[in-house]
Amino acid sequence: MAYDKQLEERIQGIVDRWKDLSAKKMFGGICYLMKGNMMCGIWKDSLIVRVGLGGFQEALDAPHARPFDVTGRPMAGWVMVGPRGVEKDADLKAWLTKAQAFVRTLPAKPGKERP
């Protein structure tokens, strides 16, 4: 199944001016990386966001959020937000900002910084 291209356009509209961000096709969808660290992406019709272990439980308490698990092994510190959880642009932006805040705490991956 292809990933949601409309969601990709909406994400791009929000993150377009963010620094040190790149996009890469991954796991049948698209992933956004900041300074080489995975930050968020799209899997099928859902948003996936990296919130870290410290923000994980709080993120799970949000409507339409669940652990990011597509292989039987959940990714630690990642949540998947169903389409209804990002219908509003404000909700989408809040999730992306949460992911950005966490990923900014990580060191850049060597050789992955963009000019």
Image: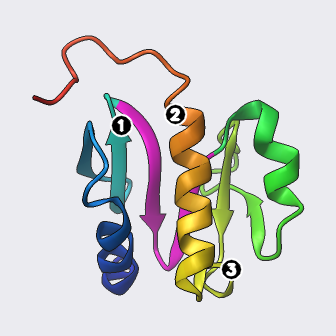
The residue singled out by tag 3 in the image is 85
Between the C-alphas of marks 2 and 3, the distance is 21 Å
**Mark earlier in primary sequence (2, 3):** 3
Looking at the rendered structure, the kind of residue marked 1 is: Met
Q: Which residues are magenta?
A: 37-50
**The N terminus - image quarter:** bottom left
Looking at the rendered structure, the kind of residue marked 2 is: Val
Circle 1 Cα neighbour tier, 10 Å, few/some/many (<14 / 14–19 / ≥20): many
The reply to whether callout 2 and callout 1 are in contact (CB within 8 Å) is yes
Q: Position of residue 71 (x, y in %)?
A: 61, 51
Residue in view at x 82 percent, y 75 percent: 63
Q: Is residue 12 above or below residue 36?
A: below
Between the C-alphas of marks 2 and 1, the distance is 7 Å
The residue singled out by tag 1 in the image is 34
Q: Position of residue 85 (x, y in %)?
A: 68, 79
Which image quarter: residue 68? bottom right
Q: How many marks?
A: 3
Residue in view at x 34 percent, y 59 percent: 15
Q: Give the secondary structure at mark 1.
A: strand
Between the C-alphas of marks 3 and 1, the distance is 23 Å
The residue singled out by tag 2 in the image is 103
The reply to whether callout 2 and callout 3 are in contact (CB within 8 Å) is no
**Mark earlier in primary sequence (3, 1):** 1
